């Protein structure tokens, strides 16, 4: 069996530089992935925030309407308590929307 050198010194240095460059590219790609993940995380956080606003407003008004209908049925005051409690529900929705940024930091 005859000994054949696999690589010369020049080729070894070249391959070392290639490996170093490959590591740099890998590190950069990891940083780019982190940037993309943080951007997508911010987008999801914004979507969650706006959906929280919508659900909060709808729930407040819905609870006001249900309470108004229920108490109207008990007391027999046809649309008046429904209107009053639905307006209270709208007020509660507006109040909770103004208090929402204080709770999220």
Image: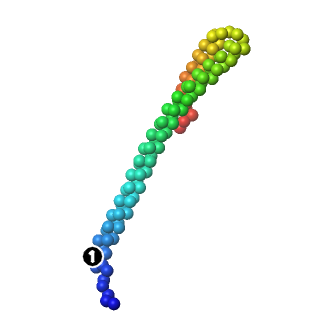
Counting from the top left corner in percent of width and height, residue 38 is at 44, 46
Counting from the top left corner in percent of width and height, residue 52 is at 54, 32
The residue under the point 68% across, 13% down is 72
Residue 13 seen anywhere in this rendered image of the structure: yes
Q: In which quarter of the image is residue 13?
A: bottom left
Q: Is mark 1 on a helix, strand or loop?
A: helix
Counting from the top left corner in percent of width and height, residue 47 is at 48, 36
Residue 92 seen anywhere in this rendered image of the structure: no
Residue 48 versus residue 97 in the image, above or below: below
The residue under the point 55% across, 23% down is 94
Q: Quadrant of residue 78?
A: top right
The extreme bottom residue here reads 1
Residue 101 versus residue 8 in the image, above or below: above
Q: Mark 1 points at which residue?
A: 10
Near mark 1 (Cα within 10 A), the count class, few <14, some 14-19 or many ≥20, is few
Residue nearer the viewer, 68 or 31: 68
Residue nearer the viewer, 78 or 35: 78
The residue under the point 62% across, 19% down is 65
- Display colour scheme: rainbow
Counting from the top left corner in percent of width and height, residue 51 is at 51, 32
Residue 77 versus residue 47 in the image, above or below: above
Q: Is residue 14 left or right of residue 59?
A: left
The residue under the point 41% across, 55% down is 30
């Amino acid at each position: 069996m005859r000994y054949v050198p696999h690589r010369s010194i020049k080729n070894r240095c070249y391959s070392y530089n290639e490996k170093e460059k490959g590591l740099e590219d890998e590190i950069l790609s990891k940083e780019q992935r982190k940037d993309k993940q943080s951007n997508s995380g911010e987008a999801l956080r914004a979507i969650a925030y706006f959906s929280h606003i919508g659900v909060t407003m709808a729930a407040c008004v819905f609870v006001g309407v249900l309470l108004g209908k229920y108490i109207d049925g008990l007391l027999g005051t046809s649309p008046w308590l429904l209107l009053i409690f639905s307006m209270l529900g709208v007020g509660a929705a507006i109040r909770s929307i103004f208090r929402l940024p204080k709770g999220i930091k």
